[in-house]
């Protein structure tokens, strides 16, 4: 039996990067949502925080959908 160690290492690296990246992106979305809530409570404009949180959550959803696409279709 032959194990392709370079391919295994590549899969490990991509999985680690994607896992850490999604967690960091989701955490950034939570922080932006908290800043939006704080800004609205202080009666300040919250447009940038709202857009940032929405983009972070949409990017997380896109990564999840892409992962499902890879598992189901390919």
Image (cartoon, grey):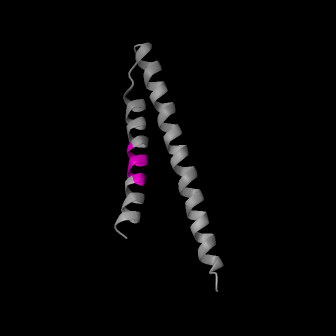
Residue occupying image coordinates x 49% and y 33%: 30
Asked if residue 61 is positioned above or below residue 39 in the image, the reply reads: below
Residue 57 in which image quadrant: top left
Residue 14 in which image quadrant: bottom right
Quarter of the image that includes the N terminus: bottom right
Residue occupying image coordinates x 59% and y 76%: 7
Q: Position of residue 64 (x, y in %)?
A: 42, 52
Residue occupying image coordinates x 36% and y 61%: 69
Residue interval drawn in magenta: 58-64
Q: Position of residue 26 (x, y in %)?
A: 49, 41
User: Does the magenta portion include 60?
Assistant: yes
Asked if residue 21 is positioned above or below residue 51 in the image, the reply reads: below
Q: Is residue 32 rendered to the left or right of residue 66? A: right
Quarter of the image that includes the C terminus: bottom left
Dominant secondary structure (helix, strand or loop) of the stretch shown in magenta: helix
Residue 10 in which image quadrant: bottom right
Asked if residue 29 is positioned above or below residue 38 in the image, the reply reads: below
Q: Position of residue 21 (x, y in %)?
A: 54, 51
């Amino acid at each position: 039996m032959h194990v392709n160690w370079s391919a295994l290492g590549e899969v490990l690296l991509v999985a680690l990067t994607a896992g850490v990246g999604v967690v960091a992106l989701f955490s950034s979305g939570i922080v932006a949502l908290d800043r939006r809530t704080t800004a609205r409570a202080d009666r300040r404009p919250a447009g940038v925080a709202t857009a940032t949180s929405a983009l972070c959550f949409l990017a997380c959803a896109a990564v999840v959908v892409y992962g499902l696409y890879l598992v189901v279709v390919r």
